[in-house]
Image (cartoon, rainbow, N blue to C red):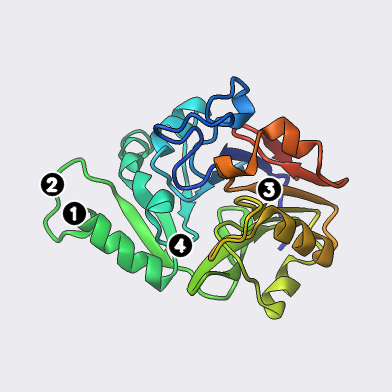
Amino acid sequence: MQAPPLSITFLGTGTSSGVPMIACECEVCSSGNKKDNRLRSSIMVKSPTTTLVVDTTPDFRYQMLREKVKKLDAILFTHPHKDHIAGLDDIRAFNFFNKQPVNVYADALTQKALRNEFYYVFAENKFPGLPEITLHEIKEEGFLVGDIPVMPVKAWHHTMPVNGFRFGNFTYITDANKIEEAEKQKIRGSNILVLNALRYKKHISHFTLPEAIELADELNIPQTYFTHISHQLGLHNDVSNTLPQGKHLAYDGLQLMV
C-alpha cells in the first residue's frame, strides 16, 4: 500500500543520557546552541488521519507537550532498553482525552520487558486511571497503523535484535551496529534514511558516524539524517560542516515532509 503524505518530527535525537549529560562541563554540554540540546531519541509520524510515535523515552511527556500533540493512535517500540520505553506511563492522558486505549506494537522481547516494567498495566484487577493499551506483536510482516503502512526492518544492537521501520519512502533505524543484507533490501529505494551515529570512536552496539555514512552510501539513499547522538560527537554546527552532501545531523524539533 502506498503511504499517504507524512510529516516526521524528531522528538529527540540524543543518546541514553541525553545532551547535556548530567554533571558534564564539556563544550557540547555547555553549548548555547539549541541544536546541541538533545532529548532521548524518538520520532513522531503523522498522516492526515493518524499519529504514531516510535518509542516512549523518559522525555515523552515533555516531547508531547512541546509538540502540542492532542491525539495518539499508536506507539511502535524498537527495543526494550529503558531510554526507549520509560515514558509509556504518560499515555494515560491520551486515554483520558481520546477515550480509548493506545495501540502498542512491540516484538516478543520488548513485550516481555513492558510486562515487567509496567506490570500494573497488565494486572487482572487494575487500579482506576492506569494506562490502557492494546498490545500487538511485531513480526516480519508489514502492517497498517490507520492509513500508515509500516514495514519492520530488523537490525542488531550488539546481540539484541531491534526493529527499525520503513514508512513509505522514509526509513528509521536507531540503536544498531549491524544490518543483514536481506534487511538492507527493505531499506533500498527510500528517499530518506535515519541512522544512529553515536560518536566517532568505535562502539560495541552503535554505528559510529563514519560507519553510518558508509552504510548510507552503500544503500544509495539520497538524504540521510543521523540521530541517537552523544556529546562525544562534537558541536552540531562543527560536525555538520564536515558532512558529505546529502548527509545531515538531525536535531530536536526537526520536521520532514515525505
* Residue 74 left/right relative to 154: left
List the residue tagged with mark 4.
79
Between circles 3 and 4, the one closer to the viewer is: 3
Residue 26, percent across and down? 53, 31
Please say whether residue 101 is visible from this viewpoint: no
Mark 1 or 3, nearer chain start = 1
Image marks 1 and 2: residues in contact by CB distance under 8 Å:
yes
Tell me the residue at 39%/37% (across/down): 98
Q: Amino acid at mark 1?
A: Tyr
Q: Which mark is residue 120?
A: 1
In three-dimensional space, the C-alpha distance between marks 3 and 2, rounded to whole angstroms, equals: 41 Å
Quadrant including the C terminus: top right
Secondary element under disc 3, as helix, strand or loop, is strand
In this view, the residue in front, 195 or 89, is 195
Mark 3 or 2, nearer chain start = 2
List the residue tagged with mark 3.
226
Mark 3 or 4, nearer chain start = 4
Quarter of the image where one finds residue 23: top left
Quadrant including the N terminus: bottom right
In three-dimensional space, the C-alpha distance between marks 4 and 1, rounded to whole angstroms, equals: 20 Å
Between circles 1 and 3, the one closer to the viewer is: 3
In three-dimensional space, the C-alpha distance between marks 3 and 4, rounded to whole angstroms, equals: 18 Å
Quarter of the image where one finds residue 242: top right
Mark 4 or 2, nearer chain start = 4
Please say whether residue 97 is visible from this viewpoint: yes
Between circles 3 and 2, the one closer to the viewer is: 3
List the residue tagged with mark 2.
127
Mark 4 or 1, nearer chain start = 4
In this view, the residue in front, 13 or 183, is 13
In three-dimensional space, the C-alpha distance between marks 1 and 3, rounded to whole angstroms, equals: 36 Å
